[in-house]
Amino acid sequence: MHLLYAAASWVALLLLSPLLLFHPKLRHGIPFRLGIYRRSFDTGRGSPRIWLHGASAGDLLSLQPMMRELRARLPGACIIVTTITNSGLAMARKKLSEADVLLHAPYDVGLCTGRAVAQLRPDLLVLEYTEIWPNLIRSAHLGGARIALTNGRFNPRKLSRYRALFGAIGNPLERIDLFLMRSDEEAERALLLGAAPDRVWVTGNTKFDALVLDVPEERDQALRGEMGLPPGAPVLMAGSTHEGEEELLLPIFRELRERWPDLRLVIAPRYVERAGRIQAAATAAGLPSRLRSRGSAGGSAPVTVLDTIGELAAAYRLATVVFVGGSFVTRGGQNVLEPAGQGKPVLFGPHMENFKDSVQVLVGRGGIQVATPEQLGKVVAELLSRPEKIAELGELAHGAVGSIRGASARNVEHMLRLLPRGRAAAPAAAAT
């Protein structure tokens, strides 16, 4: 049955090649995506060799606490990280100091994944969320690697599609040795799709471990200057906004500035390539704007567009109040726990379908869900008039995040059991 998927993957690669070659997010690193490497990946570290894969920048940041845990437990391990998008790789090069090797992931075509596995020689392949790539899983299995799924999730609305696909091509879950699921509900879905019961564990979500930053105050002040935010000025931060949300937020901000003239708005779009369009929308609303990428040379303006990658978590620390986007449009929301981890009150709209677990953690504990943009404006106005309430909600939010951390350590504990005892123990012995 796998032959059907293998053939289909070749056909898909040929049909999609124009998109893959010219799409700005996917066109770089083509040799790596084909599994063609011109150098060895012997980094000087020993074994085990652990390959972690996350689709995008945000997914890799969720894996970072687990990388730190692996490095602490296995100081001699070689940690290999792959991702799909160019922005993910750029962020990884900037942020993931724990990784020894950073690469674009191979296309899920047998020849490409086979080459990648032969060259990278992983002892353990760690996939994230729903990154179920049948050819990669098969190649890793044939190459002798153990395979784990972390932060596991399966969309309940797509279970019938998964069953149909697995029925047609063979079930790739049979080759996965360890399922580390986010919740009991996700574990049940994995079992329904054919995961072996003795391989399924509920350990939580590692993204919660990446939410609290320990940043020197001097760095906060430096970033504030680079973003053109005057000292002491209140900041409304709109994080991970999607198309159409800025047009809803800008009139609200303009009204708020009538009462708080020194108020600043920072907009961090989910996709930074939209920065120019957001500036145009601000101009149309009568609000001067600037780009964060201009640094301190960009001067000061009522609206700042955060057009850099990997800085949102640190930027949240500068906020007075945070609104998280993807929630006034039908995108299912974005990560509301990231600003909560920085001790900020967090507001979000009605569409949070993809982050129900986070909403449950935060509502009533520093998070406020609003039904309309008009209600958002009223709540922000009330908070700005009550600084003591802002501090109270921020403390609640920070405590809520602290109560749900620890998944990374639990995941690594399970993963170590997959590794041959000699390989897992050798690096620690070498370090003594």
Image: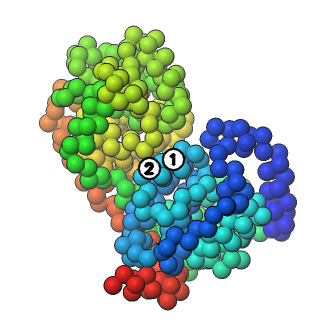
Q: Which residue is mark 2?
A: 94
Look at the picture and state if 129 lies above or below 40. above
Q: Secondary structure at mark 1?
A: helix
Whole-percent x, y for residue 395 in the image: 21, 47
Left or right of 103, for residue 421: left
Do callouts 2 and 1 mark residues in contact (Cβ within 8 Å)? yes
Q: Residue at x 66, y 80 (%)?
A: 144
Q: Which residue lies at the image location 80% right of the left edge and 50% below the top edge? A: 12
For the residue pair 256 and 63, the one nearer the viewer reads as 63
| Residue 430, x across and y down, in percent | 40, 84
| Distance Cα–Cα, label 2 vs label 1 | 6 Å
Give the residue at the far left of this rendering. Answer: 388
Colour style of the rendered protein structure: rainbow
Q: In the displayed orientation, state which residue is furthest to the front.
A: 39
> Could you tell whether 109 is left or right of 123 in the image?
right
Instruction: Kindly state the secondary structure of the residue where label 2 is placed.
Output: helix
Q: Amino acid at mark 2?
A: Lys
Question: Image quadrant of residue 225?
Answer: top left
Q: Name the residue that disc number 1 marks.
A: 90
Note whether residue 50 is visible. Answer: no
Which quarter shows the C terminus?
Answer: bottom left
Q: In this view of the protein, which residue sits in the foreground, 95 or 327?
A: 95
